[in-house]
Image (tube, rainbow, N blue to C red):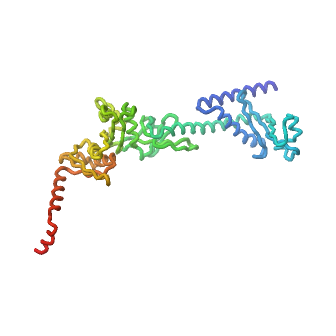
Amino acid sequence: MARKSTKEKNGGKEFLQTLKELAYEKGIDEERLFETIEVALISAYRRNFNLAQNVQNVRIVLSRETGAFHVFAIKKVVEEVENDITEISLAQARAISSDYAVDDVVEIEMTPANFGRIAAQTAKQVVMQRLREAERDIVYKEYENRESNIVTGIVQRVEGRNVFVDIGRAEALLMATEQMPTEEYNYGDTLRAYIIEVKKDTSRGPQIILSRTHPGLLKKLFELQVPEIQEGVIEIKSIAREAGSRSKVAVYSSEERVDPIGACVGPHYMRVQAVVDELAGEKIDIVKWSDDPATYIANSLNPAKVISVAVNEAEKVSRVIVPDYQLSLAIGKEGQNARLAAKLTGWKIDIKSESQAQELMAAEEVEHDVPADADLGAEEA
């Protein structure tokens, strides 16, 4: 018997040490893990010893010192016992301690001889399940706070048009709708992406949705490259993006001595080129933001030169006049430059060449110069 007790004692300590190592390795609170095991073992005890649920109240304790399991029956002190499973007489209770009174609760240890083996097997299964759940919860909390940030990962697999990316402690999903049309993704590729959403899924772990097309990715990349943005000296006011093709970024400096465009471009174009390279050659126009709508709209059409801008603030509509030779540049290929400028500023932009504007003005002048009775005179003639 002494040899068996020593074996069980050593086994309990080994089990306890294993639990502590797992908790430390997985970053899980040790006490929370012990409590979870104790709750799970109650069901295992009732199941293995043919005790119906809610018939016998028991408490199971896992010793934090020895790793041994102890089962305690919880009984209510009564004058006359009607159910000896849930009740104990006052006389029996006072045989344990004279301090007990009617309606008190007594805990009596009744650990079965072979419970240690059953408990260890059950605990192992429960521990692994709880560890997975706890780890998922930890990962969810970690990445929940990283929404709207960028992350670097390695492509693990491609299923259909969906790309699964290893981002460290979790696997993230880059859906087809969030992929740049100019890029291909293959196993082992390293990429940066923007976390647009983190969904909690207890069965499979958190679902982390990535994007390579979101304007937020462009903003975060500039923040990494431009110290003045991190310091708050320069602010990105607006972004309009057609991922993989072209983007416009409106920037503003709170200090007059700091040129926001120059800071974002960087020495020898190094800063903006780093962003362009990260986005597979996507063209980027950096324009100066202004609180004056006309100035802002003119800036937004960069690289085209603008002669004048007339604005209707009530309807947020503007008419822009550009030199004849700049018209195609202002509009852009398939209207892209004008479309991005409108998206950047939030204004509807009508672009006219200088000659078109002159013709339009001439037509309007002729219309205004026609006498009121001109049509009547014609009819009489």
Residue found 33% across the figure and 41% down from its top: 250
Query: Could you tell me residue 14's position as x and y percent?
Result: 69, 27
- Quadrant for residue 290, please give it: top left
The answer to whether one can see residue 283 in this image is: no
Residue placed most toward the observer, 159 or 44: 44
Instruction: Judge whether 31 appears above or below 359 on screen.
Output: above
Of the 4 image quadrants, the one containing the C terminus is bottom left
Q: Residue 265, position in %: x, y? A: 31, 33
- Please indicate whether residue 171 sits to the left or right of residue 262 in the image: right
Left or right of residue 151: residue 269: left
Q: Nearer the viewer, residue 79 or 127?
A: 79
Q: Residue at x 60, y 29 (%)?
A: 24
Identify the image quadrant of the N terminus.
top right
137 left or right of 350? right
**Camera-side residue: 133 or 377?**
377
Quarter-of-image position of residue 246:
top left
Please tell me whether residue 9 is drawn above or below residue 248 in the rendered image.
above
> What is the x, y in percent for residue 152?
44, 34
Q: Is residue 244 visible?
A: yes
- Which percent across, then down, holds residue 92? 88, 38
Q: Is residue 366 above or below residue 324?
A: below
Query: Which residue reaches farthest bottom?
Result: 380
